């Protein structure tokens, strides 16, 4: 059995376990009509309600720069001892994503694998929230940046050519954010502000693997979005004016380009 397959099998249960705990936050976010503010726009208008328990509606304590509300995540209970469980598709999705990271990234350093695993886990959470309520909440997007930067900094110190990869990551982050900001600025209805804020995180990981990878990952997002949209229209599940969350395609396109690029040598052996 190859080392890539062994690593994939080892990471899959880890991804499921982490999502079993972290995935509890997915149900804390509710739909919010875009009114600019917080995760829908860059101005001072009132934003969406804070993360709240799905049963009682009580707000969940969540420090501004904390990646997660740790008490709820670790215990599965919110204020008032209300139980909160992660949706099972989130657990399965994270397990599958971790397995893909292990199989396709087996030739990379441990620090790089950790960074990719974080993108896989956080990407699964953000995808689930965006699909449920068409939002990419600040509470999840904002603290992901320092975590990702720390993981890639560790990778830069432990990986050959790590310095050049780190520079590429920063360029990818800035460049991707600039492109998405421009798209939002030119036509705000066509691009959510949450997508703009997520773009830097996606560009950071793509840029680590090269600027060509960053370009390919951005193109893959739009290609996947177009293909899925056309299929939904053909099936009568969507119309020309139907709003389809774009965040899952940004994350999925990035992971596909990164992982399939890494896996080509393994698949051709």
Image: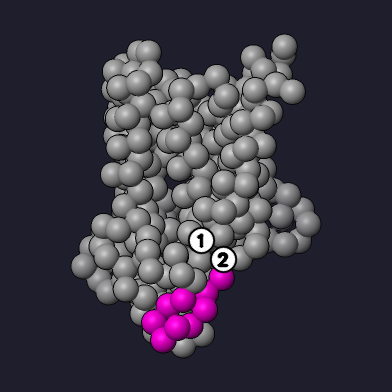
Residue at mark 2 to residue at mark 1: CA–CA distance = 7 Å
Q: Residue at x 38, y 18 (%)?
A: 159
Q: Residue at x 25, y 71 (%)?
A: 45
Prevailing SS of the magenta stretch: loop
How would you rate the neighbour count of disc 1 (Cα within 10 Å): few for under 14, some for 14-19, many for 20 or more? some
Q: Residue at x 36, y 26 (%)?
A: 155
* Left or right of residue 9: residue 160: left
Query: Magenta residues?
Result: 77-85
* Left or right of residue 176: residue 117: right
Q: Is residue 88 visible?
A: yes
Please name which of the two marks, 2 or 1, marks the residue nearer to the observer: 1
**Quarter of the figure with residue 39:** bottom left
Residue 141 higher or lower than 218, as above or below: below
Residue sitting farthest toward the left:
44
Q: Residue at x 62, y 47 (%)?
A: 13
Label number found at residue 193: none
Residue 191 higher or lower than 82, as above or below: above
Residue 160 higher or lower than 79, as above or below: above
Residue 78 sits inside the magenta stretch? yes
Whether the residues at callouts 2 and 1 have beta carbons within 8 Å, the answer is yes
Does dot 2 land on a helix, a strand or a loop?
Answer: loop
Please state the horizontal and vertical placement of residue 44, each as a whole percent of the image. Answer: 21, 67
Front-most of residues 195 and 124 = 124
How would you rate the neighbour count of disc 2 (Cα within 10 Å): few for under 14, some for 14-19, many for 20 or more? some
Please state the horizontal and vertical placement of residue 85, each as a whole percent of the image. Answer: 56, 70
Q: Which residue is mark 2?
A: 86
Does dot 1 land on a helix, a strand or a loop?
Answer: helix
Q: Which residue is mark 1?
A: 21
Residue 225 sits inside the magenta stretch? no
């Amino acid at each position: 059995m190859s080392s890539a397959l062994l690593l994939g099998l080892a990471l899959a249960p880890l991804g499921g376990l982490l999502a079993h705990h972290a995935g509890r936050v997915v149900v804390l976010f509710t739909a919010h009509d875009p009114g600019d503010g917080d995760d829908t726009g860059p101005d001072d208008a009132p934003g969406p309600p804070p993360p709240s328990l799905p049963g009682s509606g009580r707000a969940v304590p969540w420090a501004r720069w904390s990646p997660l509300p740790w008490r709820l995540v670790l215990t599965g209970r919110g204020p008032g001892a209300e139980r909160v469980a992660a949706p099972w598709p989130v657990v399965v999705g994270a397990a599958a994503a971790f397995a893909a990271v292990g199989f396709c990234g087996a030739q990379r350093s441990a620090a790089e694998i950790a960074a990719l695993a974080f993108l896989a886990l956080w990407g699964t959470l953000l995808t689930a929230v965006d699909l449920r309520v068409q939002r990419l909440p600040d509470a999840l997007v904002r603290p992901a940046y320092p975590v990702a930067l720390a993981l890639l900094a560790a990778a830069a110190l432990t990986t050959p050519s790590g310095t050049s990869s780190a520079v590429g990551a920063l360029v990818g982050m800035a460049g991707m954010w600039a492109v998405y900001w421009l798209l939002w600025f030119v036509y705000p209805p066509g691009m959510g502000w949450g997508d703009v804020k997520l773009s830097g995180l996606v560009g950071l990981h793509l840029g680590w693997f090269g600027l060509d990878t960053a370009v390919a990952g951005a193109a893959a997002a739009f290609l996947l979005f177009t293909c899925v949209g056309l299929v939904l229209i053909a099936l009568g599940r969507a119309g020309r004016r139907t709003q389809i969350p774009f965040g899952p395609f940004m994350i999925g396109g990035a992971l596909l380009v990164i992982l399939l690029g890494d896996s080509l040598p393994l698949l051709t052996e």
